Image (cartoon, rainbow, N blue to C red):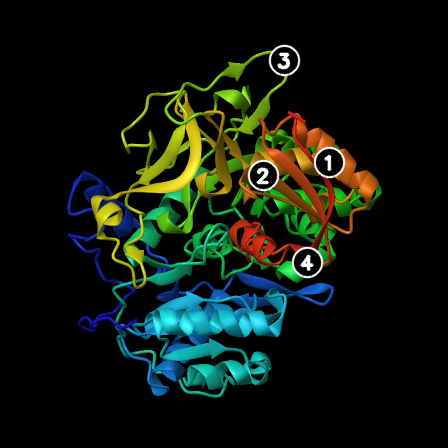
Amino acid sequence: MTMAPRPARSPLSAPAETASTLNGGNVANQASTAVVRSENILAWLEDPATDTGLRFADGDGWQLHPYAELSMRARRAATLLQAAGVRPGSTVLVVCPTSPDFVAMFFGTLLSGATPATVGIPASFQSRTAYLAHIDRLRRLVGPAAIATTPELRSSLGDVTEILGTPVVTDSGESDVDLSAPLPLSDIGILQFSSGSTAEPKGVRVSLEAINANVTSIRDWLDWGPDDRLVSWLPLHHDMGLVGGLLAAMSRSSDIWLLRPDQFIRSPHRWLSAFSEMSATTSASPTFGLAHVLRRVRPADLDGLDLSTWRTLIVGAERVEPAVLRSFADLLAPYGFRREVLLPAYGLAEVTLAASATRPRTGWRSVTVDPASLALGQPVGVRTTGQGTEITSCGTALPAMGLRILDEAGEPLPDGTFGEIEVSGPSLAQGYVGADDAGHFARGALPTGDAGFLLHGELYVVGRLGDSLKQLGKWVFAEEIERVAVDVSPRPNRTVAMLGTLDGRDTAVVVVEGIDPIGAALVGKALTKHALGLRVEVRRGRTGWIQRTTSGKPMRRKMWERLVDDPALTELLWHGDERE
């Protein structure tokens, strides 16, 4: 992807644009301009702090890198990138683990006037073949001018660089830095790749104005103060870890402690203990991260921890399960953790990150609904007694953001009605790379493909429309099928559900890695009570059959296609439906 260069100017003190293509100069855009003038994710580079910084997990300890050092490294990275031929308007693939190199190359790309596109490292993929295919797709999609990586990864990316035919830039720490030269700024701030849970990941073009607007909204919502400190294990190539974690905290020069995802997976206790040892206050995690803590951490492991300084824990990136929230809070409560620390939220890469969230100190809510009432355009049946589906509130719209629920014709629906979620506001992206998508993005509002409802102004997210089937006039969602399966599965973290048509029948397929026939029957019988007439299959898959995005979401569409193309890769252990 190439863009026309803009006139050179310093990005550190430049005023916000007075007009933008994001919203066509309407009221929403004016609000965005006001937000951007007050915040800038690059401002820390101008006068970097010496007494705060980023600490990266290293062995059993933490390695400190003050903001002043990181600013120097970012400027040096910009010089190296320019020497390699990177020009304003070009794109750089940033392939770095959670490390000082990531920070330097990400901000160095921005300072060189180019657009960073962050990519997971090879270890985050199941195989080298899959990784090479992923990189090749990105090459065709964005046409990068360079790859920015670490000296350690450079040799392992040899095959990748041969495919790309582009220079690889690393920092040996020996280059001179010109601190006086003004550097141009790219028209597009970053390229974020959507998770790809229902389709191939898309390159989302996010302007610096949109990033600044979303970061400001997040910090205003969290009441971020000078004493707030972040601990995160989320991957920095994913929007939740990058925007909601790194950029939001760095824009205030806050102290930050960063674990790599693999370090968290091996020892979730280390994430928890950092709050006690560092008096940290905030973090973020998908639901599966909290579930991983529940599987791996026992109460005896927590002896001596003091979690009373923990103020906010954003929970998002996938459907937020209320049972997991309750169990997580119960596990940590004896050590000072409070239920109201949990803040369920909703967002997506197309809106930079966050669209709605639970306000701090208010406590999260849930409602129980009749699943048979989840029909587009129809009122949701909320139950005060009896069985049903419990759904977590993801709070209210963030400052300057808008939420609506739409029917199948795209018309807005009233409070308490089920439909498609639409988001709007100043942090909306500019569009997708290589796509003719001027319609929704240019109008400043985007139907998300997610289904849910608003109730008293709070958003309840049910699931992806792309992961659902209409059955007997109602919608059945893969997320709900999977929740039921996980609750009874002997291998809950190795269980995935998909929906589609097999042999002319609408079918719910659950694949469990390593399950036996007795466990499969247990899952199958539980599902027939919830599948609203769908045929149910429970299949055994080999270890590694389940595919997930880099943010942990099941790649249902890819797995369904593989199931249809070669069903022999899994073994059918149980089938039936409630009509049989």
Q: Quick check: can you spot residue 69? A: no
Name above or below for residue 366 compared with residue 496. Answer: above
Residue 569's mark? 4
Q: Quadrant of residue 108?
A: bottom left
Three-letter amino acid code at the position of disc 3: Gly
Please tell me which residue lies in front, 387 or 188.
Answer: 387
What is the tally of numbered marks visible in this picture? 4
In this rendering, the label closer to the viewer, 2 or 3: 2
Q: CA distance from mark 4 to mark 2?
A: 18 Å
Three-letter amino acid code at the position of disc 2: Thr
Q: Quick check: can you spot residue 392? A: yes
Which mark sits nearer the N-terminus, 3 or 4? Answer: 3
Q: Which residue is mark 3?
A: 386
Q: Which residue is mark 2?
A: 507
Q: Circles 2 and 3: CB distance less than 8 Å?
A: no
Callout 4 crowding tier (Cα within 10 Å): few <14, some 14–19, many ≥20: some
Q: Circles 3 and 1: CB distance less than 8 Å?
A: no
Q: Which residue is mark 1?
A: 523
Element at label 2: strand
Q: CA distance from mark 2 to mark 3?
A: 27 Å
Q: Give the percent coordinates (x, y) of residue 390.
A: 58, 25
Three-letter amino acid code at the position of disc 4: Leu
Answer left or right for 481 relative to 227.
Answer: right
Which mark sits nearer the N-terminus, 1 or 2? Answer: 2
Q: CA distance from mark 1 to mark 2?
A: 15 Å
In this rendering, the label closer to the viewer, 3 or 1: 1
Q: Give the percent coordinates (x, y) of residue 269.
A: 73, 50
Image quarter of the N terminus? bottom left
Please tell me which residue lies in front, 56 or 552.
Answer: 552
Which mark sits nearer the N-terminus, 2 or 3? Answer: 3
Residue at far top of view:
385
